[in-house]
Image (tube, helix red, strand yellow):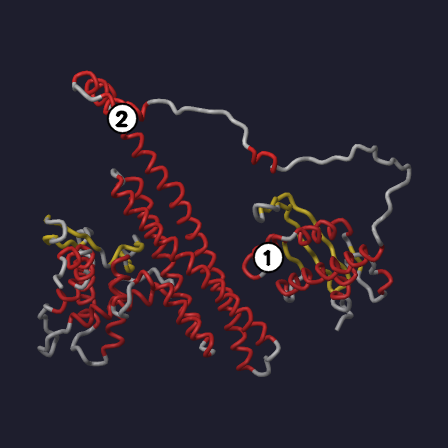
Amino acid sequence: MKVRPEEVLNNYRDRIYRLSIYEPLIELSRKRERDGSGNIINYGSLGFLALLFFFENMIMRNKEVGVKELAEFFFEINKGKIDLDLGGFRKLARNIIDVFRPPSGERRSKSFYNWETGKDETIYYSILKASKSDLKFNTQYYTLDEDGLELVFATREYFSEFQLSINQLLLRKQLEKGEFVGALRQIDEMRLAVENLKDRISKIKHDVNRNIVSEKILKRYRELVEDINIRLARENEEFDELESFVKDTKNAMEYEVKDEKDKRAYDLILEIDKELNLVHREHRKLLQESISLKITALEAAQESLYFMGIESFNFKQEITNRLISTPLALKSSRQLVKPFLSLGSHISWSPVAVFTEQRIREDKDEEKTNEFINPIDEKIIDEYKEITMQNFKRIMEIILEIMEDGKEIELEQVIEYMKINYAHILDERVFYDFWIMLHQVSPITIDGDEGNHIGLFEEVIKLLIGRYKGLKVEESNKILDVNHRFKIKNMILKLEGDDHGI
């Protein structure tokens, strides 16, 4: 069986790119500088350690990393292996950074002959990029660029396109084994992968608006966006399952806290739940953005191609001159002008119309009565009251959980906390009824006589008996835009302490 050349040469440019990002490490390995003892310095391994150092700082969200910090890291791990002082390591760190990011600020490039297209081409890549600068001390900080992350991920023997999916798998394994510290670190890496994907989608969005000049390019970008959308949807499903798994674990551990070790594990699972929710929220935004890119940006690009074709189309030259100057058969002439003729129309009645929905009314007159409408069954009203009281009690428990030992709290603080931990409650009207009704009955005196605690806030007052002697809610002018359904004025809830309480 003969090998097809197109199969061998497929994606030749991408393969050269993946090889080219290793060239800075190869260039460092060729250096032959010597230390104070005359031994050759292994620049290649130090360059790789520098990449890992910048990657770890990205995970820790430390953006102030430059030559000084890298040199101190080398000096700390050296332990006599290389005969250099701190000043020597600073020079070494500067040389490594200059290889990863040339002093001119230009991206690294590689020229090659593309056997797939038959043309000489150049690819550009960037390992490090400028993060921020300290003008006071004339210091420049750096962070890994997209290609630098690609190089770090490549050392783990998988493609960065699947980094988030693999992180999700590793996170599940760590949670199943109870390795909560490692799970938190895995979530930090997932956050970096989401940020990297966000930059990539933003770049694709700009490329769509700038580079689509033909149907072939439009088709390539449409397939790329479709692949990203499918992957994001699959990852979103995995996020939902992970959040469900974490919540089940948290609920199971809540009643098993016996000693300090159990408390530490429970605190870690709470932190995991919070951080995972934050990463999932950012990932959901990417999913919405990819859907928007698929629907709006690509359609706009397709329409622009259509109007470009209309503007460049010359009716007189393409149709009129050819029809008049060139002798054509009658059938060929009809085919030439057919796209510009109007469509024929025919109005008819369809038998299927008898199956359409119709209004049916009785001819007899409705019997009129002069009686009042019967009230709702008392049993139904009692059930509704009981459900509302329990809902109000749950909301008050969450407020007390946020306040801890505090005496007052703003509604805005409660909403921000619940967006992270109890977002589903903010979608229910009962939350807003609670605050409005509580403001109406405020101030409330809390005492031990349960006969005075009637109404929908009976269970709420029971939570406060013995701890507080009064509750007051004051309204402010600020309007809180909670979500697309609800807005409410900000309020301040104040609890007056019970000096004789236990």
Residue that protrudes farthest toward the bottom in the picture: 259
Within the image, what quadrant is residue 174 found in?
bottom left
> Hey, what amino acid is under mark 1?
His
> Closest to the observer: 456 or 496?
456
> Closest to the observer: 313 or 439?
313
Mark 2, Cα crowd under 10 Å, few <14 / some 14-19 / many 20+, is few
**Mark 2 touches mark 1? (CB < 8 Å):** no
> Closest to the observer: 300 or 193?
300
Q: Nearer the viewer, mark 2 or mark 1?
A: 2
SS for callout 2: helix
Within the image, what quadrant is residue 341 found in?
top left
Within the image, what quadrant is residue 339 found in?
top left
* Tag 1 residue: 424
Name the residue located 31 percent from the left edge and 54 percent from the top edge.
Answer: 132
> Hey, what amino acid is under mark 2?
Gln
The mark nearer the N terminus, 2 or 1, is 2
Q: Quadrant of the C terminus?
A: bottom right
Question: Is residue 166 left or right of 266 when viewed as pictured?
Answer: left
Residue that protrudes farthest toward the top in the picture: 324
Name the residue located 35 percent from the left edge and 56 percent from the top edge.
Answer: 197
Residue 268 x %, y %: 50, 73
Residue 353 x %, y %: 58, 34
Q: Quadrant of the N terminus?
A: bottom left
Picture layout, residue 189 above or below residue 370? below
Residue 214 x %, y %: 25, 38
* Tag 2 residue: 335
